[in-house]
Amino acid sequence: MSDSVGMFIALEGGDGAGKSTQARLLVDALTEAGFDVVLTREPGGTPAAEAIRSVVLSPEFAGLDPRAEALLFAAARSEHVHRLIRPALERGAIVITDRYVDSSIAYQGVARGLGVDVIAEINLWATQGTLADLTVLLDVDAATGLERATDPNRLEDEPADFHDSVVQAFRTLAAADPDRYLVIPAAGSPEAISAQILDRVRAEYQRRSQ
């Protein structure tokens, strides 16, 4: 397959959903098929964005004001898009990110109660309207996900109802725009989940190439 068409894929889901594992498997499969693939994560992906990550996810900053938290995530995302994501897409790469705008909507917009529309507007401005072509939602209930989580951070310490709200928010976002989402129960084997994701990515890439 040709790698001349850029494509932006975001993996989303609650903590412990398996996003990082699936991102790596997808990168391996696409690289083997000859694509130019960029793997990244949020918050992060550039030196400045990684520095923001060290603040916004550190338990040292427990109790960070929700608005400050939302703005820090948006700032990291703006830098990420400007420095890494858009240049890669412009050269025809497939960009795969572990989290993107939907995470801010779910965590800050819904679970923090700041409002879906407010967070969406901030992030659309921060990214100059750059949205994922395909969002893969790995759907797992909050309690199961937290048991599986391997990268402790400040947000994981929030109470159970916070994480329940996050999971439901992701489901609501996916249901509102089903053509742009692939929703997969995260309870299956990593290999089976990876195969489903790769099938959808191939189909979407072919559609975009026509």
Image (cartoon, rainbow, N blue to C red):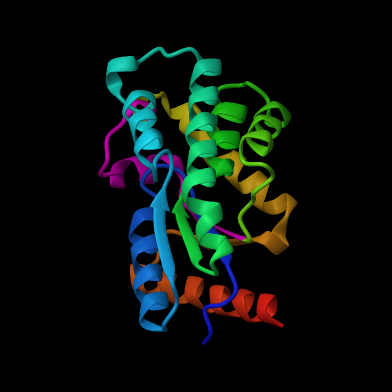
Q: Is residue 43 left or right of residue 209?
A: left
Residue 178 at x, y percent in the picture: 70, 59
Residue 16, how many percent across, how many down? 36, 47
Front-lying residue, 173 or 97 = 97
Q: Residue at (39%, 59%) from the top-left corner? A: 39
Q: Nearer the viewer, residue 163 or 38?
A: 38
Residue 118 left/right relative to 46: right
Q: Is residue 17 left or right of residue 149?
A: right
- Residue 80 image offset from top left, x and y in percent: 48, 43
The C terminus: image quadrant:
bottom right
Can you give x and y, in whole percent of width and height, for residue 18 in the image?
37, 55
Question: Was residue 148 drawn as part of the magenta stretch in this picture?
Answer: yes
**Viewer-proximal residue, 53 or 160?**
53
Looking at the rendered structure, the number of numbered marks drawn on it comes to 0
The image shows residue 56, relative to residue 94, as above or below, that is above
In magenta, the rendered stretch is: 134-155
Q: Residue at x 58, y 62 (%)?
A: 90
Q: Which residue is at a point 73% across and 54% down the rendered structure image?
A: 177
Residue 114 visible: yes
Q: Is 141 situated above or below 178?
A: above
**Residue 34 falls within the magenta-colored stretch:** no
For the question of whether residue 187 can be seen, the reply is no
**Residue at 52% of width from left, 30% of height from top?**
75
